[in-house]
Image: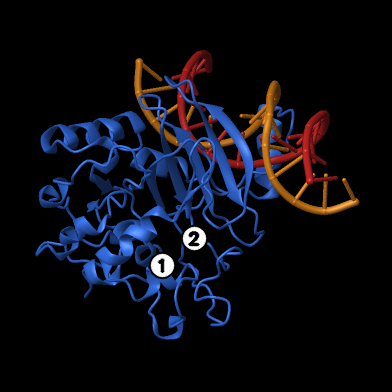
Chain colours: A blue, B orange, C red
Amino acid sequence: MEMGNFKEFEEQIASYNNTTSSSLSSGILDMWNTSDYCDKSSLGFMDLLGFDPAYSFLFNSQSPPQQPSSVFPSSLPSTTTSTLVETSEVLNLPATPNSSSISSSWAEPTSDDQANKLVVKDEEEKEELCKSKKQLKPQKKYQKRQKERRFAFVTKSEVDHLEDGYRWRKYGQKAVKNSPFPRSYYRCTNTTCGVKKRVERSSEDSTLVVTTYEGQHTHMNPVMPRGGVHSGYQANATTFNMPVQISTQHNQLQQYPYLQSLQPAFNLDSSFVHSRGFGTSQASRIEDHGLLQDMVPRDVRVEE
DNA sequence: CGCATTTGACCCGCGC
DNA sequence: GCGCGGGTCAAATGCG
């Protein structure tokens, strides 16, 4: 499947939904990548939206979703399977039409990864470039764009920029082709942290917001430190927090909707909750699996 | 004043 | 080589 294209992304959701009679917001999507930094091809990922306790059976499946190792930090154990995960059993999610949602994740396409291969040019190179091209603004830096792990998810929300506990600075906005909605670019305000995220609204369904994270936070979540205030637990350099607040148009009442719904389904007693300062701190004995642990409870992960 | 946002210019890769 | 689209920079501006 072509990647990095939101429309196709949506189409895939729609396709899934057509076959499963589930709503768009509860579709299960494939996560994929072809980049060389992600040595696995693609993985399925579950929709966090509908994690009503009633759906807990999804995670008791005998074929739990594969660990999406390809887009998670290298510290995570690799899975042995790397092809598309069969998600049919999980696809029969009941519709949750009006919920705020987390929908899926994916890695960026090869072309996009290739676009991330900017090289830091040294001064000689810059001078050379200026001579050859007569740059008007040769002082501009050429930044290396590292191959960063990315993941994205779709959120049904009235607000574009979801609060996820980190502080972000907007550094750009671009019109999206064939879409009336612009794409916004954010960078983590922590100077030592190169995490970026892109936020764009679906042209097909303006209620859906696609947020793509790139990179890994190298610092603690300033709002909700991992492990809680008293644990002294330092953030692993491979952590993300999912948005913790989904807003409605006139208020922001739906805080932590999926955390609330996840807990019974996941039988959470560990990192997913602790990473957000919920519950008591046991972080010191919790192996940090970075983003993965934030999104998929240990119980449903396949580890080696 | 410090920080965040806006926005046009610029850079780069890719396809033709 | 050129145009296009995506991504980034950085000056200007806004705001508390």
- The image quarter containing residue A74 is bottom left
Q: Chain of mark 1?
A: A
Query: Viewer-proximal residue, B3 or A102?
Result: A102
Camera-nearest label, 2 or 1: 1
Is the same chain shared between marks 2 and 1?
A: yes
- The image quarter containing residue B13 is top left
- Give the labeled residue for mark 2: A216
Residue A138 visible in the snapshot: yes
Task: Estimate the x, y position of residue B3 in percent, counting from the top left.
Answer: 75, 51
Type of amino acid under label 1: Gly
**SS of the residue under disc 2:** loop
Query: Viewer-proximal residue, A92 or A3?
Result: A92
Which mark is drawn over residue A109? none
Say whether residue A199 is left or right of residue B10: left
Say whether residue A285 is left or right of residue A174: left
Type of amino acid under label 2: Gln
Query: Viewer-proximal residue, A2 or A266?
Result: A266
Q: Chain of mark 2?
A: A
Task: Estimate the x, y position of residue A191 in percent, counting from the top left.
Answer: 67, 59
- Give the labeled residue for mark 1: A290
Task: Estimate the x, y position of residue A91 in percent, counting from the top left.
Answer: 16, 46
**SS of the residue under disc 1:** helix
